[in-house]
Image: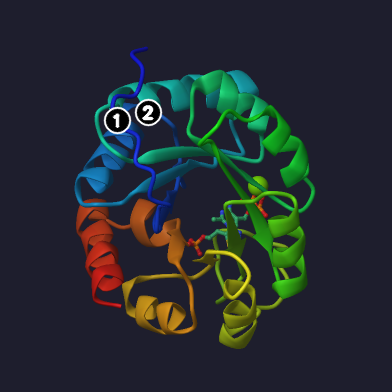
Amino acid sequence: MPAKEVRSDVLPRIHCITHFGSYDDEAIAVLEAVVRQGVDAVQVRAKSLSDRQIVAFTRILVDRLAGTSVRIIVNDRVDLALAAGADGVHLGRDDVPVAAARRLAPLGFLVGGTCRNADQAREAKAQGADYVGVGPVYPTTTKSGLPNPIGLETLRDAARVLPAIAISGINAERVPEVMAAGAYGVAVASAICRSPQPAIAARGLVDAIALA
Ligand SMILES: Cc1ncc(COP(=O)(O)OP(=O)(O)O)c(N)n1
Ligand SMILES: Cc1ncsc1CCOP(=O)(O)O
Ligand SMILES: [Mg+2]
C-alpha cells in the first residue's frame, strides 16, 4: 500500500458513510465515483464485517484513493483505523473516549465524536475532538434505536462549540437549512449509497454545500 500522497489539512465537510449490502469491488467503485464528485470524507461504517474485513476494506480504499485529498475515517474503532492507515476515526457514545483515541493518534489524524447536544460537544472539545457528528437531525431508516430528532436549534447550539457535521436523514434538499443552522458539513449514508445513481446524488450534495 503506497503512502497517501495528498492529505488535505482542511476539515472535510461531506462525509459519505458507507451503507452497502456487500463490501466488494462494486462498493469501492461507488466510493471512487462519489469522491470524484467532490465528497471529501468517506467513513467506513460496516457493522456486519469482522475486524479483519474492516481493515482489509479500508486498506483497499486508502490505496485506491491515494493521490486524492479525501479523508478515510473509520467508524467506532481507532485501532482498526490505525491498522488500516486511515486518516481518522469517528467515535460514538459507547466507544473509546475521544481523549483516549487522541493519545494513540498521530499528528493530523482526525478524531470525531457523536454528540446529541451542546454539553456533549463541549465534552468532546475538551477531550480534543476535531469535529462533532451531531444528530439525529431528522428521522432515518438507516439506523434503529436512535433518540428522537434533536432539531435545528440543538444543532445550532452544538455547532457553536466545534465544527458540527449534521447527521441523519440528510439529503441535498435539507443541506440549506442545516448549514443555515450553523453546521460545518453533513454526513450522509442512504442518500448516496442507496441511491440508484450515487455519483449524481453526491454531486447534488457537493453543489448544495457549495451554495450554502
Ligand atoms: C459524522 C458522524 N456522526 C455521527 C455518527 C454516529 O456514530 P455512532 O454514534 O458511533 O453510531 P454508529 O454510526 O456507530 O451507529 C457517525 N457515524 N458519523
Ligand atoms: C450512523 C447514524 N447515526 C445517526 S443517523 C445514522 C445514519 C445516517 O444515515 P442516513 O444518512 O441514511 O440517514
Ligand atoms: Mg460508531
Residue drawn at x 29%, y 24% is 5
| Observer-nearest of 63 and 163 | 163
User: Residue 3 is drawn in which quadrant?
Assistant: top left
Point out the image quarter for the N terminus: top left
Q: Few, some or many C-alpha atoms within 10 Å of disc 2 (few <14, some 14-19, many ≥20)?
A: many
Up the image or down, 25 lies above or below 119; here it is above
| Residue type at tag 2 | Leu
Do we see residue 46 in this rendering?
yes
Which element carries disc 1, helix, strand or loop?
loop
Q: Is residue 102 left or right of residue 174?
A: right
Which mark, by number, is residue 61? Answer: 2
- Tell me where residue 122 appears, x and y as whole percent: 73, 65
Q: Which residue is mark 1?
A: 65
- Tell me where residue 16 appears, x and y as whole percent: 41, 51
- Tell me where residue 62 appears, x and y as whole percent: 38, 26
| Observer-nearest of 172 and 102 | 102
- Tell me where residue 81 appears, x and y as whole percent: 57, 29
Residue drawn at x 38%, y 62% is 191
User: Residue 180 is drawn in which quadrant?
Assistant: bottom left
